[in-house]
Amino acid sequence: RLTRFYHLHSEGKFRQAEAFVCDESRDAYYDSDKRRWQSLEIIKVNFSEEFTKAAVVVALGSELRTRTGNIPAKYPYTSMWKVANGAWCYYIPPPTDSETVTPFGVMRQQKNAGSGQATQSMASNQRASVAAILNAVRLSKERLVVKGYETSSDELEIYNGMTGVLFVEVQAAELPGLSWKLDKGKLEAGERTKLRVQYTPRDKSPKPSFELRVLAEPLGHAFPVKIVFDIPEETKKQLPPAVRP
């Protein structure tokens, strides 16, 4: 949903992007400046302990005007998201006396005493939170094996160990004869889904391995899955052990 939200911004479809905004933040969204960002890069995700809120640091691509012309530039921005009505939505926290809302997120006043130590502790907590949430989303396999000489299939299971909603989709280049299917793309907390891969080869020749990625949102993380094309046993016996699939 986060990538779709910013994709709509890149197309200038700000009204359509409203569908991804939390109800209580829509007035602030209407009043905010909007730009047609050219690219999106997710830097890190910091989740709340209940995994129902997330601060997503992104780099938004645009152009910087200079005296010699426009040059590509990326602007950091902390995008705030939370779960509402079973789905992640973008929200804008109301400012307080110690905070100022800017186009690059909420800027907080830093206390002089112990500011370096507090910053170091925050960075450590953010790294721990990202590691914990990535471990909460698990794939039962990182490698699927199908036959490169006849129709066959293999499957893996995806588990959402978070307390919030997880959206998954498969990303890969096209390969003739290879197809895949997810049982479902939206996983509630504690739910599982299966990814099935089927391959129907055009011939019986040996084939190189292939990789697809399982994209998990709102994590912005892609889990790589290697597809190995097995060969007949009689052919396998003729190969050196080091190169057998």
Image (cartoon, helix red, strand yellow):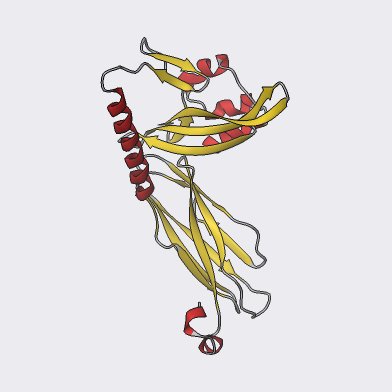
User: In terms of image quadrants, where is residue 4?
Assistant: top right
Q: Is residue 104 visible?
A: yes
Q: Foreground: 123 or 49?
A: 123
User: In terms of image quadrants, where is residue 158?
Assistant: bottom left
Image x and y of residue 86, in percent: 42, 35
At horizontal 66% and vertical 28% (from top left) the residue drawn is 63
At horizontal 33% and vertical 45% (from top left) the residue drawn is 132
Residue at the far top: name it: 97
Q: Is residue 37 visible?
A: no
At horizontal 36% and vertical 16% (from top left) the residue drawn is 109
| Left or right, 38 with reference to 139 | right
At horizontal 49% and vertical 57% (from top left) the residue drawn is 224
162 w.r.t. 140: above or below: above
Image x and y of residue 92, in percent: 46, 21
| Left or right, 241 with reference to 17 | left
Image x and y of residue 51, in percent: 35, 37
Residue at the far left: name it: 113
84 w.r.t. 100: above or below: below
Q: Foreground: 64 or 106?
A: 64
User: In terms of image quadrants, where is residue 75?
Assistant: top right
Image x and y of residue 164, in percent: 38, 39
Residue at the far front: name it: 68
